[in-house]
Amino acid sequence: MDLYRAHVLVCGGTGCVSSGCNEIIEKFKESLKIHGIEREIKLVKTGCFGLCEAGPIVIVYPEGAFYSRINPEDVDIIVEEHLLKGRIVKSLLFKDSVEEDKIKAIEEVGFYKKQLRIALRNCGVIDPEAIEEYIAFDGYKALATVLTELQPTEVIEIIKESGLRGRGGGGFPTGLKWEFTAKAEGDQKYIATNADEGDPGAFMDRSILEGDPHVIVEAMAIAGYAVGSDMGYVYVRAEYPIAVERLQIAIDDAREQGLLGKGIFGADFNFDIEIRLGAGAFVCGEETALINSIEGKRGMPRPRPPFPAQSGIWGKPTLLNNVETYASIPQIILNGAEWFSKIGTEKSKGTKVFALGGKINNTGLLEIPMGTTIREVIYDIGGGIPNGKAFKAVQTGGPSGGCIPMEHIDTPIDYDSLIELGSMMGSGGMIVMDEDNCMIDIARFFLDFTVEESCGKCPPCRIGTKRMLEILDNITEGKGKPGDIEKLERLSKNIKESSLCGLGQTAPNPVLSTIKYFRNEYESHINDKKCLSGVCQELLQFVVIDELCKKCGICAVKCPASCIDGVKGKEIYSIRQEDCIKCGACVDACPFKAIIKE
Amino acid sequence: MKTIQELEKIRKETLEKISLRKDRKGTRIVVGMATCGIASGARTIMMVLLDEIKKRNLHDVTVTQTGCVGACRLEPMIDVYKEGEGKTTYVDLTPEKAKRIVSDHIVNGNIIDVYTIGAYER
């Protein structure tokens, strides 16, 4: 490997792949060659930088110039201007990184300023397919330390003291889980990673696997040493092809370097990892269903206890952690439990990765210390709501979580505060809603998802969620009846208490939290048959404002249902409500804004 | 991998090559690479600098480029920013001069006055 004067980092996360980063990379290769500078400039495909909104992203070091939304045509300009002549192309820089002609370093950009990247520390910095780059950034050092200097019990003690809690959503203390598994009796124990990220809108696990796969390999080996296991499984969904591919490369490279296999670092410790692909069922993120699926059985949960720590894969004691949980482990070993426990709040230590989506300017992936407020995430990091709209609520925890309204926007984010608000941390999806979102429609969307994903094993979840969805459908279609809200609340309570697994136990949360904070919207849907946000089609009416109508007849021409009557130039037009299909074509067609929906 | 030493070796070797992305401390050499600079041979100078830095295992030196500062007749020229030293501008460079700048100035901290813009203008 030669010394290069500049490094061009192109984001290779799934978000940027779909916005065309592979083409950008090819174009760079070509352009560097044409200009004869391919020996001076190193081109690296990294993992996700987090700012998916601005993808494809290209960062040029040593200047740290942050180029966003790069098209293949822009590549020649960057090569000719920046790489050849040393002039940063300001017009292509990420808009927030340019301030009064001064170019800010990446860390100074609002999106990154309040972040603290521990689990994501290597994402967007290293080449995920080069084991040396991971090692250069202190990779496998924690494993070496653990194997040569620490006893398994000491490792568990460090994790316990750090206060790390499971990042998959439940928030169970990780150190305790490790201890239970270590103490469980069994001739064979297994380490497993839950990478079956199924929440709509969540992609932190995928990004870690894509951007820094070795951290999972290293952390699983550390866990193996701590609990006394020599075999690990990563359960990842087949819908994450890039993540699967890079993880496989990481496992192969680690084997080749002797970082997996027998006698790692000369210690009496063997460890190996295999990938198991899931078919993308949401319920397989539940630990007992996941274990069934690893064993090749149908992915259905079973009652607990026994917990996986006692009886997991093939009935053997199994330590199952989430990807993000593992991603924090090597840093905790290297920096100490005290370092980690100083970050965050009293009961939630460290940092959490969130996938920010919905009505927000900076869609993407971010990592913040626990205790950061929702307002900081939405406005300082997320850059606020687009088009000057007002913030209405944020949904955390996906289909298992709930909506948090404006009045609680200053809540510091941690496991307990979110549960208190009727939501939950979940895996870390954060979907922002503005004034145009109807909360019943949102609740309906998530419930529709859980109905679809319910495995059907227990009746409260299989039948109960279906009944709830039917009630919500009725409400959004204007067929809501007085008493529906109470019925929803009663059903929710029963489903939460009697479902077999976490899927059913949390499925009513989106409905309960929207009833709690937006009861008036439910009431106006049921009693007045009105959707205040103008989302529920059945409750809408399109009407012509007589004073504004210029009798041009354009609306009548555009109407696909031919339900607008009038005479061109002579008579004001009007819409026959009984035939209207509420497509909104007339609103778009009217040049005088004389048609409104109400 | 059997020992921590092996791991440390890989770490050090790779870090050298990617330190560009990690910190921006240390010495920075900025090569004038506008059309005028390139035409007068700035690219050769830059390659010499890179080779020297690699040969001497200098971890904290980065080589970057810049545009035209207006003194095209003095090209190829470079600016050396060393910590606590401010900027030194060397002009009318040749590969030999560039090598000496690395050994005398970058490594040993002795500015070579005769190559600087001040001396040239006198």
Image (cartoon, rainbow, N blue to C red):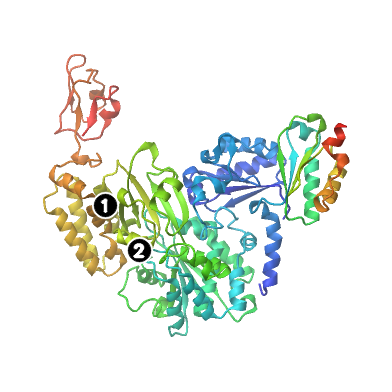
Give the label, 1 or 2, closer to the camera. 2
Q: Which mark is residue A108?
A: none
Q: Which mark is residue A443?
A: 1
The residue located at (25%, 52%) in the rendering is A517
Q: Position of residue B17 (x, y in %)?
A: 70, 55
Q: Neighbour class for label 2 at 10 Å: few (<14), some, many (≥20)?
A: some
Using residue A189 as the reference point, say whether residue A22 is left or right of it: right
Looking at the image, residue B7 lies above or below residue A17: below
Write down the residue under mark 2.
Answer: A416
Which three-letter amino acid code belongs to the residue tagged 1?
Ala
Disc 2 on helix, strand or loop?
helix
**Picture quarter containing residue B121?**
top right
Q: Position of residue A596 (x, y in %)?
A: 23, 30
Using residue A566 as the reference point, say whether residue A186 is left or right of it: right
The residue located at (84%, 51%) in the rendering is B103
Q: How many marks are shown on the rendered structure?
A: 2
Subunit that carries the residue with mark 2: A
Question: Where, quadrant-wise, is the N terminus of chain A in this rendering?
Answer: bottom right
The residue located at (18%, 17%) in the rendering is A567
Q: Residue furthest top?
A: A570
Subunit that carries the residue with mark 1: A
Question: Where, quadrant-wise, is the C terminus of chain A in this rendering?
Answer: top left
How far, Cα to Cα, is label 1 from label 2? Answer: 22 Å
Using residue A167 as the reference point, say whether residue A519 is left or right of it: left
Which three-letter amino acid code belongs to the residue tagged 2?
Asp
**Picture quarter containing residue A257?**
bottom right
Q: Nearer the viewer, residue A510 or A449?
A: A510
Whether residue A320 is visible here, answered yes or no, is yes
